[in-house]
Image: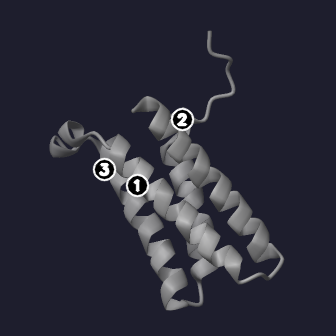
Amino acid sequence: MSKIRSILYTLATILIIIGALFILQDDAIGILILVVGLVLNIIYRAINLNGNKLKTFNWLELLKLGSMLFMGTACLSFVLDIDQKFNLLILAIVIDLLVNMKEISFKKRA
């Protein structure tokens, strides 16, 4: 299961980056790739959410849940073609990175 989660996270990250590059080139398919990457990221975050900590109202788990909901809102803004969709997207990705900072590691694992 751990391998599947790491593959899912890597695939989501790659799709988000590729989608962002296509959007910068003003290509319509980039939005679809980006939204698929965001949905995969939401699925990954939902799998890793700790239900027991969420039931006890652990603030970090609540922040992770809020980050997932905000990312879902950013995905929905692309579908509904809201004016501030790119700002919501950037904010959702930054919040996701800040809340899930421990997954980003620059240390070598032994």
Measured as percent of width and height from the top left, residue 104 is found at 60, 35
Which mark is in front, 1 or 2?
1
Q: Are marks 1 and 2 in contact (CB under 8 Å)?
A: no
Tell me the residue at 27%/39% (across/down). Answer: 50
Real-space CA distance between mark 3 and mark 1, rounded to the nearest whole angstrom: 16 Å
Find the residue positioned furthest to the left.
55
Q: In the rendered structure, which disc, 1 or 2, sits on the residue that comes first in sequence?
A: 1
Q: Are marks 3 and 1 in contact (CB under 8 Å)?
A: no
Real-space CA distance between mark 3 and mark 2, rounded to the nearest whole angstrom: 17 Å
Which mark is in front, 3 or 2?
2
Find the residue positioned furthest to the right.
25
Q: In the rendered structure, which disc, 3 or 1, sits on the residue that comes first in sequence?
A: 1
Relative to residue 37, is residue 39 drawn left or right? left
Crowding around mark 3 (Cα neighbors within 10 Å: few <14, some 14 to 19, many 20+) is: some
Kind of residue at badge 3? Leu
Q: Residue tagged by mark 3? A: 62
Kind of residue at badge 2? Glu
Which mark is in front, 3 or 1?
1
Tell me the residue at 67%/20% (across/down). Answer: 107
Tell me the residue at 32%/44% (across/down). Answer: 49
Kind of residue at badge 1? Ile
Q: Quick one: 94 or 27, which is closer to the camera?
A: 27
Q: In the rendered structure, which disc, 3 or 2, sits on the residue that comes first in sequence?
A: 3
Which element carries disc 1, helix, strand or loop?
helix
Residue 67, image quadrant: bottom left
Question: In the image, is residue 3 above or below residue 54?
Answer: above
Which element carries disc 2, helix, strand or loop?
helix
Q: Residue tagged by mark 2? A: 103
Measured as percent of width and height from the top left, residue 79 is found at 50, 85
Real-space CA distance between mark 1 and mark 2, rounded to the nearest whole angstrom: 16 Å
Q: Residue tagged by mark 1? A: 43
